Amino acid sequence: MSKEEDTSAELEDIISPLRKDSRSQSAEEPQFINKTSDSLNEASHYLKGKPFDQIYETHPTKNTLESSSSSRSKSNRNEEPKENFELAQTTSDANLLSKPTTSQSSLLPISETISDYQVFVNFQSHEKVEKVSSQVSKENQPSDLSSDNFTLNLEAKGLQEFPKDILKIKYVKYLYLDKNQIKTFQGADPGDIRGLEILSMQENGLSSLPPEIQLLHNLRILNVSHNQISQIPKEISQLGNLRQLFLNNNYIENFPSSGLKNLKNLEILSLGKNKLRHIPDTLPSLKNMRVLNLEYNQLTIFPKALCFLPKLISLNLTGNLIGSLPKEIRELKNLEKLLLAHNKLTFLAVEIFQLLKIKELQLADNKLEDISHKIENFRELRILILDNNLLKNIPEKIFCCVMLECLSLNDNQLTELPKNIYKLKNLKTLHVNRNNMVKITEGIIHLNNLCSLEFSGNVITHVPIEIKNCRKITKVELNYNKITYFPVGLCALESLYYLSFNGNSISEIPVDISFSKQLLRLEFNENKLLTFSEYLCSLINLNYLDLGKNKIGKIPSSVSNMVSLRVLILCYNTFETFPRELCTLKNLRVLDLSENQLQKIPSEICDLERIQKLNLSSNQFVYFPIELCQLQSLEELNISKINGKKLTRLPDELCNMTQLKKLDISNNAIREIPKNIGELRSLVSLYANNNQISSLPPSFLSLKDLKQLNMKGNNLTDLPSAICSLFSLEEINFDDNPLLRPPMEICKGKQLHTIASYLQRADERDEKILEKTFKIVANNITETNFEFLRQKLNLVNSETDIPTKSTISLNERAYQAFVKWKTENNLSLTTAALRDQLVRGLNMIGAYDIMDKITALNLFTRAIKF
């Protein structure tokens, strides 16, 4: 996992609590850029891996228009919507920093607990957002034309030409053509497009902008992100009314020499994820620029030209190669947000501390060794991110940042925090993971507004009992420290819902924890617990409990009190029998008992009526526990055996689990797949690698939803020809099998199309060889041998089914009998199997002369390269 991924995941948790506090900020016309506390929420785009892309004004927004216009009265439908206020709406974009899959930093996905806070969004109230969202989801309009008179949304319609015909019958001001293949405006009547105020053409594969773009004199917002544009066209300079321009995720290497100086009204410019190396000195001519995004380009120096944009309040230079800051940076008097994470900074120019309006400063993943005491000037600072640097201390003067709400210091070399940190009365988030902290600074216990506290990956031995004074704390992470006793002070925190102590040396759970009934998630993985404490059973609201990698062997009967428990992790413990007590957890969805010593499953397991995921891998089952087949709700079952005794067969009852979507039986000694496997209609993933399976049953071809199939390391010699009918297959692996049909070299590419093509040709070839074999036998067999062969193969009775026997030759009768025999057995036997059966029959009747001819045919066909 990369450092950038770690940083992104943790920063997501840092900012999320701050979003809630800023939802209700009202907008002031005509300012579409939020001020003061709203700027805090812009961090969510960096933290969630979203560049501030696709920023739109309020009324032209696609969803807002489509939902609100439907409730508009007829009398108002023909009126142009008033511009009460403007907003910058950020829709979902490709992640800049993907979240690590192993992160367990939040109880629920952020999207489920906190609504997306958008960069520079100005809604009059949070309630309006909810109303609009629900209205859109209810209506789900299928029509290409919005009910709004001025909006046309043709996103992802497979268009290759500009929709000129529609524009002739509908006056359009806001046009969305995202995810099509439109390359030109050719054929469009200039009169029809001159009225456009918003044009979005994301993901159209554009290599350049159509020259007709210069005709759009009324255009205020242009979004051509996610294309293949290599240069900013000069025609854009003709768009004097343009206020927002988005060119993210393209291939732009050079800024226009003119610097877009004619765009006097431009307020937002986003050029993130391009290949820019230089910014022209003419950029300061854009006097109204307020938001500038240059993230993830190839800038090696901080362009001085940026320092002379007098109205700039947000500057994003994340992910460049900048090594230092110019002294001219002090000129950015109105700057509120500065993002410089993932650069090459080794120090901060002292002039940066003259930016007195700064509210958010992100400097993660640089090479900073020191922070100046002049940080005391940042009296408006709300968010300070210093993760993954080389800091050994934090200046005492940080206490002057009295508005600070979020302080993140992960992955540095800190041994202590300033003693006067208690003066940061507004601090809500404090993260000091993976440093060299030996104790939690005493001043922290006076941070009355603290909500999230993380000190994982340090060498802390205890937590002061005074932590109970931080009554607003909702989340505490103290993973991988040296803590031996559970900090009872935490049990007095009435708002605490997330508590994680993984990787410590705690051996006992105190009775005090039974008072923390508000807890939702609790983690004690990799400690030294010997018992499943009865005190845990008092946590009636707990829905996630991780006790993996301890030494627990029994479950108390009072576990039935944990009525809210959804996820229970008990892997790597010492259970020898499946605890019957767990079967009382009616709401349990996920149960992990892997890496124990289980040998049997009790029949009571059927009481887990809502179980969806069950991991029993690496236990001591000699036989597949047939009791599992009663679990009608089960969607994922893992009974693989990296360690422990190996299973040799699967029961036919396995197919009773009709909801099963994922089955892992890898690393066993299973010889065959159940013949009725096809009844698992919902199966999406089958992992059967490293077994002894020699064939796939015919019903296997009924698994139409199968997407992942791993049969590596088995005894397969051939694959069914109809495997191509499994159209959903995306990932296949047949490595390390003795495959002959198709040969292993065909399967190495792991492409179903290649395998299916080979099998189709092989079938055609085998048909021809079998046909030739029939003729050889029919032309050379004697009457006596034919009668013997007929009996051996149960061929058609020549006397009853061939009434004109006296007039038909022996070779004709024999050939017709073989053809009918093939027809009757075609469904149950492959062409190759029929040929082998015929050869065995000839051997049994002693027709060696015919055998010699067939052998010669086989040698000849093998000599021909297939």
Image (tube, helix red, strand yellow):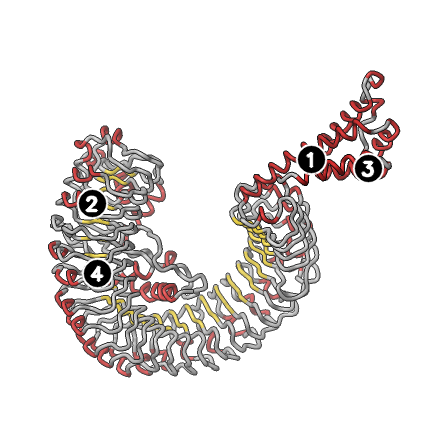
**x and y, in percent, of residue 743 in the image:** 62, 46
The amino acid beneath tag 3 is Gly
The amino acid beneath tag 1 is Leu
Distance CA(mark 4)–CA(mark 1): 69 Å
SS at badge 2? loop
Residue that carries the numbered disc 4 in the rendered image: 315
**x and y, in percent, of residue 817 in the image:** 78, 27
Q: Which mark is in front, 1 or 3?
A: 3
Q: Residues within 10 Å of mark 3 (few under 14, many from 20)?
A: some
* Image: 430 above or below 179: below
Distance CA(mark 3)–CA(mark 4): 84 Å
The amino acid beneath tag 4 is Leu
Distance CA(mark 4)–CA(mark 2): 23 Å
Q: Which mark is in front, 4 or 2?
A: 2
- Do callouts 4 and 1 mark residues in contact (Cβ within 8 Å)? no
Residue that carries the numbered disc 1 in the rendered image: 827
Residue that carries the numbered disc 2 in the rendered image: 233
SS at badge 3? helix
Q: Residues within 10 Å of mark 1 (few under 14, many from 20)?
A: few
Q: In the shown orientation, is residue 239 left or right of residue 116?
A: left
Q: Residues within 10 Å of mark 2 (few under 14, many from 20)?
A: some
The residue lying toward the viewer, choosing from 246 and 561, is: 246
Residue that carries the numbered disc 3 in the rendered image: 841
The amino acid beneath tag 2 is Pro
